[in-house]
Image (cartoon, rainbow, N blue to C red):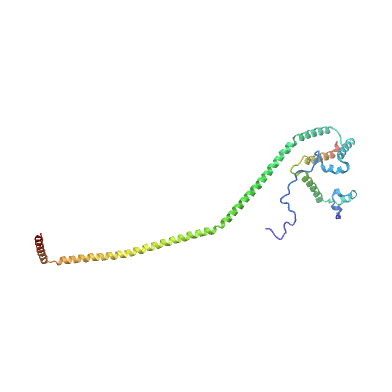
Amino acid sequence: VLHCTRQLHTTQQSLAPLPPLPEKGGEVRHGLIPEEFFQFLYPKTGVTGPYMLGTGLVLYLLSKEIYVINHETVAAACILSVIIYGIKRFGPDVAAFADKLNEEKMAKALAVKNEAIEGLQAAIEEEKKEQWRVEGRSYLFDAKRNNVAMLLEANYRERLMMVYNEVKKRLDYQVAMQTLKRQKEQDYMIQWVEKNVVQSITPQQQKESIAKCILDLKALSRGAHAAA
Amino acid sequence: LPAAVLLKDTKLMDVKLGQLPSWLAMRDFTPGGIVGAIQRGYNRYYNKYINVKKGGLGGISMVLAGYVVLSYVWSYSHI
């Protein structure tokens, strides 16, 4: 939990991003004495001043036996000569190798940074595209609304059709019932009339009708003979 | 007209020879002060000679030479 009553970042300077490392270190002459010493003595003694000082000091140390010459001196001289020979011979190669290592490190860091930047820019592009897409949502909703309306309409018409069909079926049934009933009544009535008529024909009437028919036939045949 | 700087705040190279004892007396000799001074000295040397992109030979050779000289001084009586 951050208590926001305390003031943060009260100082002016903030060391981020860090300032880059200096390119080269302080100058050192002969690997041992910083250049500032030579510059310090230059106004008073010129160029050869520090060397004269060095020579005088060495002679003083030797003569007063502050620096004693013994077996260790010989050993130190041999070791120093070997070291100096090695440095003069392999120095530049080692320096180049170290520089290469540094270069690789820097290149990796830069690659990471660039990739991060590119990734973020791609994300920005995507975001802008999404924002553009958002503008089209009204069309999307219109299309959806149309779809829904069409579905409702289709459903409504379907049901209307079903209602119509059902009602028609019921009415057809009633009509069919009525026609059937009438037909049955007619048939029955015809049958009944025929039956009664046939019943009412007595044998007497049958003989009379047959005789009449024969007379008619004879008349007709006489008429046909006369005509022919 | 440059503002007068207190003797306490002058650097060693700007102190005149006559003022040297009083300047030395004003330094901070508490343990914390000594540790701070050592740390400042170390940081100065480190940032000038070692913490650079292309460091050279002088950075470590000066430390080794100083070590050689100091060990000679300490073992002078045994020679």
Q: Quadrant of residue A107?
A: top right
Residue lying farthest to the right in this orientation: B18
For the N terminus of chain A, the image quarter is: bottom right
Q: Nearer the viewer, residue A132 or B20?
A: A132
In percent of width and height, residue A151 lies at: 45, 60
Looking at the image, residue A215 sits to the left or right of residue A106; the answer is: left
In percent of width and height, residue A158 lies at: 41, 61
Q: Could you tell me which residue is drawn at 69 percent across and 42 percent down? A: A103
In percent of width and height, residue B56 lies at: 76, 40
Q: Nearer the viewer, residue A120 or B36?
A: A120
For the C terminus of chain A, the image quarter is: bottom left
In percent of width and height, residue A92 lies at: 74, 37
- As displayed, is residue A127 above or below residue B71? below
Q: Could you tell me which residue is drawn at 87 percent across and 43 percent down? A: A43
Q: Quadrant of residue A164?
A: bottom left
Q: Could you tell me which residue is drawn at 73 percent across and 37 percent down? A: A94
Looking at the image, residue A120 sits to the left or right of residue A143; the answer is: right
Q: How many numbered markers are drawn?
A: 0
Q: Quadrant of residue A128?
A: bottom right
- As displayed, is residue A110 above or below residue A89? below
- As displayed, is residue A59 above or below residue A145? above
Q: Could you tell me which residue is drawn at 67 percent across and 46 percent down? A: A110
